[in-house]
Amino acid sequence: MTYPTVYSYLNIAAINAIVGSRIYGFAEAPQSPTYPYITWEIISGRPSNYQGSAPAVDNYRVEINVWTRDQQNALDAITEIQSALDAHGHQLVQIGPSVDPDTQSYRAQLDYSLWTSR
């Protein structure tokens, strides 16, 4: 399977204007992160199987989380992430923004179905 280049989809000027270069894969942000930032991870993947030939594309469910200290920042980031990822797949879920009880930061989550050619 060929993994989607999620980082390259998110590492664009409009998103960088909000979070800078703080885009972390595998949902692994630094221990004491600078806000705002984004984490992403691949939740699941599956090939598009065909009878008698190898799959040409793979489909992945990707979770993207925006972490901010300001609710409007979270909403702005969601808008830019949607614009960036809609060209590569479709949105499945949006959750939040809501306040994370442990960090007292705002968290907004988007799940996307992304297709990647082999």
Image (tube, helix red, strand yellow):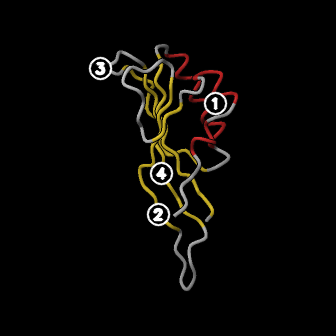
- Which mark's residue is nearer the viewer, 3 or 1? 3
Q: CA distance from mark 3 to mark 2?
A: 34 Å
Which amino acid lies under the numbered mark 3 shown in the image of this protein?
Asp
Among numbered discs 3 and 1, the one appearing first in the sequence: 1
Give the image location of residue 118, x and y in percent: 61, 65
Three-letter code, disc 4: Arg
Task: Answer with the quarter of the image where residue 15 lies.
Answer: top right
Q: Secondary structure at mark 3?
A: loop
How many C-alpha atoms fall within 10 Å of the one at disc 4: few (<14), some, or many (≥20)? Answer: many
Disc 2 secondary structure class: strand
User: Which comes before the other along the chain, label 1 or label 2?
Assistant: 2
Mark 3 = which residue? Answer: 102
**Foreground residue, 117 or 106?**
117
- Nearest the camera: 10 or 93? 10
> Can you identify the residue that label 1 sits on?
80
Of mark 2 and mark 4, the one earlier in the sequence is 2
Front one among 84 and 11: 11
Q: Residue at x 48, y 42 (%)?
A: 111
Residue 46, numbered label: 2
Q: Which residue is mark 4?
A: 61
Q: Residue at x 50, y 46 (%)?
A: 92
Residue sitting at 60 percent across and 58 percent down? Answer: 116
